[in-house]
Image: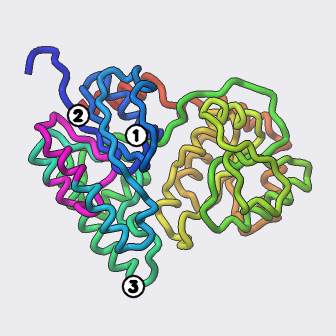
Amino acid sequence: MKKNEKKNILIIGYTHPKHDKRVIRTVESLCKHYNVFYQYAVSPGEKDSEQEDIFLGNVKFLPLIFDPAKESTMIKKFTARRPFDKKLLLIIKSRKWDAIYFHHFCQTFPVGAFRLARKNSDKIIYDVHENHPENFLNTLHGVMKKIKEFFMWKVFKKQLILSDRLVLLSEDFKKEVFSKTGVEKPYFLMPNYACMKAADVKKEKTVVYVGKITRGFESEIKIIKELVRHGFKFRVIGSKNETFNTVEHECTGFLPYGMMMQELSKASFSIVSYSTVSDSGYMNDILSLPHKYYDSLAAGTPVIVKNSFTTMCNEVRRYGCGIIIDVHDVPASINKILKAYENYGSLQQNLINCIDNFVWDKEKEEQFINFII
């Protein structure tokens, strides 16, 4: 390689869409020091223009067609995913890479793709932002769930052994991964930081919910109804959802990121509560740090967080940037929120003091790049 010539890195987004926040952040950062080859998923018939990404200079885009509609059952999922995964393996084999960055594992070749990457690259970086043994086939229950997780922890351990460096979501998540696998590798902690801070605006007596609902929001609806009764407005920032049909609310529809942050900044509180699956012990929820949480705080809006979300609750206690509630105790939750609103000035000041901790910036980017290169 010639002096000052940029090295080549393959960033595997797998089934993430092109502009997934976490994935595109790594692309935008690493293209400053690497020639980036970026694999991501596109839907059948989706228009995929590179023109909009002209600012990304050193990036070659490698879209693969992915149709989740063909994956309605476990067997259909395997048969539909296999051709997609084989195309990804061909990309890995296509040249000798200086580095390969996995944002997810190849589901029908969960270890094979890492072994192939080991042969075809000098360095493997594994960005683990989900508890894969739990998240993979997360609709399984009972004995099948236990068997699946038993084998997936073994698979996950092999993936970690084959990796050189890890990018992880949080300290809590790091402890969970290292303790259960017995594997420790150099790591970098990268939560799902917000992209920007929102301008300071006058607050409305409004509670917002950002994004979609998957299941189990009945208790939260009771709390929201009581808040409406106490004079709060409720606004959903995102698409309409029948979950909210029983409560008086406004719905913004989908908004571009900047406009979404503006809407968030107007609210008094942002409620962060959800259940991905029916299992209350689901570690992907317990240790989660979702984009909506960091976006809310970066918009200057204190969060209302469900008490089972261990990692978020630890941050809320540390920074005093929100309220922790037991969603099943409606009266106590309402009392906490109303008291916090009475002392809203102190909550706002706490958030002003710590807001930079929740936003991706040049310093964090440089630390990330130095870790990777």
Q: Is residue 261 left or right of residue 359?
A: right
Residue 226, by quadrant, is bottom right
Nearest to N terminus: mark 3 or mark 1: 1
Q: Is residue 206 left or right of residue 27?
A: right
In the picture of the structure, the residue carrying the numbered disc 3 is 143
Label count reads: 3
In the picture of the structure, the residue carrying the numbered disc 1 is 23
In the picture of the structure, the residue carrying the numbered disc 2 is 9
> Of the residues shown, which amino acid type is indicated by label 1?
Val
Q: Is residue 188 left or right of residue 251?
A: left
Nearest to N terminus: mark 1 or mark 2: 2
Q: Position of residue 104 (x, y in %)?
A: 33, 52
- Badge 1 element: helix
Residue 127 seen anywhere in this rendered image of the structure = no
Magenta residues span 87-115
Residue 218 seen anywhere in this rendered image of the structure = yes
